[in-house]
Amino acid sequence: MQPFELSLTEASRALRARELSPVELVESVLDRIDAVEGRLGAYVTVAADAARAAAVRAEREISGSGPRSPLHGIPMGLKDLIDAKGMPTTASSDVRAGHVAERDSTVAERLAAAGAVLVGKTHTHEFAYGLTTPQTNNAWDHSRVAGGSSGGSAVAVASGGATFAMGTDTGGSIRVPAALNGVVGLKPTYGLVPRSGVTSLSWSLDHVGPLTRTVQDAALVLSATAGYDPRDPASVSGPAADRFPGGGDLRGLKVGVPRNHYFDRVAPEVEEAVRRAIERLAEFGAQLVDVEIPMARYIQAVQWGLMVPEATAYHERSLRATPDLYAPDVRILLEAGELTSAGDYLRAQRARTMMRDAWARMFDEIDVLAAPTVPMTAARSDQDAVEWADGTTEAVSDSYVRLCAPANITGVPALTLPVGHDRAGLPIGMQLMARPFRDATVLRVGRVYQEAAAGTGRLAPVAT
């Protein structure tokens, strides 16, 4: 096994045991990027020289006083919305061409303090306003979408071009590409991981979280990045970082299985794989409980009613100054936001409050909700819509956001992990959700499943 193939947990263990050096690990990842990047397009910027220098420092520090954290010496990618001092933050947009961050985001600062090695900035759908990341190809099939908006981060992790990466999630932007590329993606509880120094799409829906090879890897990254930050108005004091270990067994745990919404208009292979995975949770001791998803008919209206006007407000100045620099799909959405009335926005806010209350009552009956992450595997890059068995036609982007949006609206933690492949060999993801600040619960359930399931956490078979 080459060093780039190791999960974060495996690499950290090898570094601590002095069986592997940070220099060897970083060089292996950089070589992997050189070998596959031409096919995948995961990175906007690869900071090879800076990464090598950081690896040398990490090796010296680990050899001296030992590792600062499990992340010390581990190569990572940052979505190109997340500031790292001295590096470009372009949001994969011509609007931001030449922009260089003057200081670290809180997430970058905390990861640097933990000793992680930044190898580059990963592509996003422009300003995170889309679900495909058109610059990037799916790691399992280059003719298909990577998912978005954190597509570059997911593909980098799935291909071995980063041991872990950070993304953002406003309507599924961590979970969608994670599911489509067969990796783990965690959207933490709203406010748990600070967003200061991170370009916003929709401030009341934005989350920052990790994309990793395994659930345990995600727990380690969450431990390093979670915690209160006075620079982020939405930041909250959540559980202590060491409360995210995952694992254990599932005896006494109630897992909700949705009767509606999450299995409506879902590809048969996706439904079969996810239901099979849910049954495995019962084998591990969990009790399965049928639940009704409250206010399901309003989910997409509330998501768009919040996101569209907030995104337009954020971009108001640059949209008027340099509208032609935006990609056509993003510009259309931003201009549509100018037509949203204050009354519509306030109604969406009110509906969100009602939905949060209804979901809280649902979680009084269960500990975890288990469901498909997305209703279908990766679409073809030239595919605009999907036709469902009931005769309805749905835009690809609407399809991908439909099952992820509730966790953004309600702010609950949501974890996706791979649970199989379809007949074409494309990954299928299962999503686990819990009440706010029960991030440790979804990690616990995900880790129990993943450690018992064969073939999870493997790299995509990218030809070199």
Image (cartoon, rainbow, N blue to C red):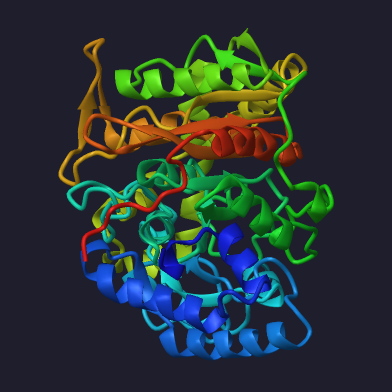
Q: Position of residue 399 (x, y in %)?
A: 35, 31
Residue 285 can be seen, yes or no = yes
> Taking 413 as reference, is 183 above or below it?
below
Left/right placement of residue 151 relative to residue 441 reads: left
Left/right placement of residue 59 relative to residue 363 reads: left
Residue 346 can be seen, yes or no = no
* Residue nearest the viewer, comparing 337 with 178: 178
Numbered-mark total:
0
Where, quadrant-wise, is the N terminus in this rendering? bottom left
* Residue nearest the viewer, comparing 317 with 100: 100
* Residue nearest the viewer, comparing 298 with 268: 268
Q: In percent of the image, x 48 and y 80: which residue is there?
A: 24
Which quadrant holds residue 84? bottom right
Left/right placement of residue 417 relative to residue 39 reads: right
Q: Position of residue 291 (x, y in %)?
A: 61, 10
Q: Position of residue 367 (x, y in %)?
A: 72, 23
Where, quadrant-wise, is the C terminus in this rendering? bottom left
Q: In percent of the image, x 54 and y 68: which residue is there?
A: 82
Q: In percent of the image, x 63 and y 84: which residue is there?
A: 58
> Taking 414 as reference, is 323 above or below it?
below
Q: Position of residue 293 (x, y in %)?
A: 58, 15
* Residue nearest the viewer, comparing 287 with 235: 287
